[in-house]
Amino acid sequence: MGIPKVAKVAPNDARRAEICRTAAQIFRDRGYDATSVSDIARALGITKAGLYYYFESKEALLLEITNYGLDRVRDQVILPVRSIRDPEERLRQLVLRHARIATDGHGAVAHLTDEIRSLPPAMRRKVEQRMQRTADAGRRRARNRLAGARRRHPRERIEAQTATDSIARRTALRSR
């Protein structure tokens, strides 16, 4: 089985975005494996054929949802915090911005990271590599914060080390 291709429809299409939002919520509530294409189509009030017009497969839909989430992390967390010079403020903004994304839409997209195990191996590897690059960027920023804190108060070192350890634990858990 090859990598499913996403149908060639304008990425800004409102219906396509609605399908992704609805599917993400259903995947979060029921789990990816327990959700059928019929379930998603029924929730949207369309036929399965109508759903297949937008997405070649359920895997292609999950891939697009996952990539959307990773794009949001890049655009709303990673890129904006790069310009913050103060390491403490950079770390604070990284955590706050990430939390905001994780709770948008009741966390529907954020909770799907465990579902990537259901993707075909080639698709899964690409998503995992992208997630790893994002996690590595977060760890680098936390290490920079820690390095800056070493020159300051011991309490700041503990806070920075705790944040760095938390990111490392979360990455290790996701890679299992």
Image (tube, rainbow, N blue to C red):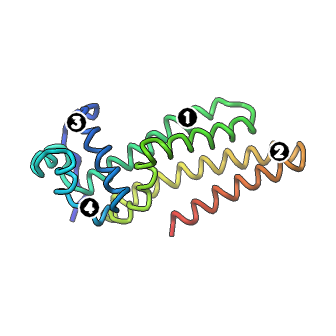
Answer above or below: position of 164 versus 16. below
Residue 79, disc: 1
Mark 3 residue type: Arg
Give the mark nearer the N terminus: 2 vs 3: 3
Residue 149, disc: 2
> Residue at (66%, 48%) from the top-left corner?
140
Left or right, 77 with respect to 55, comes to right
Q: Secondary structure at mark 4?
A: loop
Q: Are marks 1 and 4 in contact (CB under 8 Å)?
A: no
Q: Which residue is mark 3?
A: 15
Structural crowding at the residue carrying mark 3, measured as other residues with C-alpha within 10 Å and reported as few (<14), some (14–19) or many (≥20): few
Mark 4 residue type: Thr
- Discs 1/3, front: 3
Image quadrant where residue 7 sits: top left
Answer above or below: position of 139 versus 31. above
Mark 1 residue type: Leu
Give the mark nearer the N terminus: 2 vs 4: 4
Q: Secondary structure at mark 1?
A: helix
> Residue at (50%, 45%) from the top-left corner?
103
Q: CA distance from mark 1 to mark 2?
A: 22 Å
Structural crowding at the residue carrying mark 1, measured as other residues with C-alpha within 10 Å and reported as few (<14), some (14–19) or many (≥20): few
Residue 35, disc: 4
Mark 2 residue type: Ala
Left or right, 31 with respect to 3, comes to right
Give the mark nearer the N terminus: 1 vs 3: 3
Q: CA distance from mark 4 to mark 3?
A: 20 Å
Q: Secondary structure at mark 3?
A: helix
Left or right, 164 with respect to 128, comes to right
Depth order, front residue of 60/28? 28
> Residue at (50%, 41%) from the top-left corner?
101
> Residue at (51%, 65%) from the top-left corner?
175
